[in-house]
């Protein structure tokens, strides 16, 4: 099956950029997703990228995909306190998603 | 955007009782819904995939007689935890396949926290 790995923690100063990294193992994954989970809540879809793209930008979010290395990153520009949450990377295999363990992002003043 | 609701948002029950959790797609039709379980500080574990009008497909290690799934319509799937025990306490999240700008993706509900005493 697909293995998706992420670093577990990231601490960033308010106003700086955050970069969350993710690696996956199955090169046939067609879509890669980033979800945000706030405490006690479900998952909110932030953005996704098709496997034939290498970059996607959506307001403060930039997704970079290196398909050769099976590496995905999410950059959050001008990080705010409201960005503190757990961020999950997910890779699709058909209609199923495989999730990483989540990266806890803490934004400090 | 696509909205998925879950009800109840939390439930406390006695050991041995059954608990039903509803998952609804509010503004789109979902032929496929998914049920996940999340333990504290861990990732989501897919339990089963439910297709409207047919039997659910369970992941390996998930007891289908324990976790009954019914997908009776294009907007509603239910998960019933039968004869719940304390080890069934968890955060249960559903998702529904919907279309976002011509791309099918999964939209997640807010989750249901179950505590079995």
Image (spheres, rainbow, N blue to C red):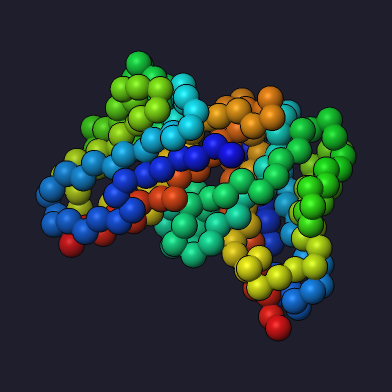
Q: Is residue A109 above or below residue A7?
A: below
Side of A105 relative to B33 (left or right):
right
Q: Is residue A60 above or below residue A57?
A: below
Along the horizontal axis of the image, is B67 left or right of B61? left
Residue B70, by quadrant, is: top left
Question: Going 37% across and 38% down the picture, which residue do you hit?
Answer: B23
The percent position of residue A6, horizontal first and vertical second, equals 68, 56
**Residue B39 in view, yes or no:** yes
Image spot of residue B41 (x, y percent): 49, 63
Percent coordinates x, y for residue A28 in the rendering: 73, 28
Q: Is residue B20 found left or right of A54 in the rendered image?
A: left
Q: Quadrant of the N terminus of chain B?
A: top right
Where is B77 relative to A61, above or below? above
Task: Give the residue displayed 24% in from the left and 41% down from the top.
Answer: B20
The answer to whether residue A63 is seen in the rendering is no
Q: How many numbered discs, if any?
A: 0
Q: Position of residue A53 (x, y in %)?
A: 85, 35
Question: In the current view of this chain or complex, which residue is farthest to the top?
Answer: B53
In percent of the image, x 48 and y 32: which residue is there? Answer: B27
Report the quarter where the C terminus of chain B lies: bottom left
| Towards the viewer: B78 or B55 | B78
Question: Which of B66/B22 is in front?
Answer: B22
Image-based side of B52 in relation to B20, left or right? right
Q: What's the residue at 69%, 62% (across, down)? A: A7
Q: Quadrant of residue B72?
A: top left
């Amino acid at each position: 099956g697909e293995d998706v790995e992420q670093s577990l923690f990231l601490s960033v100063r308010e106003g700086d950029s955050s970069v969350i990294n993710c690696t996956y193992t199955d090169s046939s994954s067609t879509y890669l997703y980033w979800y945000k989970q706030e405490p006690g809540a479900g998952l909110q879809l932030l953005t996704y990228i098709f496997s034939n793209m290498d970059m996607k930008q959506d307001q403060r979010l930039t997704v970079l995909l290196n398909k050769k290395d099976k590496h995905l990153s999410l950059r959050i520009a001008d990080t705010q306190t409201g960005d503190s949450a757990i961020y999950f990377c997910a890779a699709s295999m058909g209609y199923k998603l495989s999730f990483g363990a989540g990266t806890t992002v803490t934004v400090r003043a | 955007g696509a909205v998925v609701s879950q009800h109840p948002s939390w439930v406390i029950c006695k050991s041995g009782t059954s608990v039903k959790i509803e998952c609804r797609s509010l503004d789109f039709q979902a032929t496929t819904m998914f049920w996940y379980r999340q333990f504290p500080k861990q990732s989501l574990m897919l339990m089963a995939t439910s297709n409207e009008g047919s039997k659910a497909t369970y992941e390996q290690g998930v007891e289908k007689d324990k976790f009954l799934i019914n997908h009776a319509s294009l907007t509603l799937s239910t998960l019933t935890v039968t004869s719940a025990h304390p080890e069934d306490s968890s955060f249960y999240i559903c998702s529904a396949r919907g279309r976002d700008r011509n791309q099918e993706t999964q939209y997640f509900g807010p989750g249901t926290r179950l505590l079995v005493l």
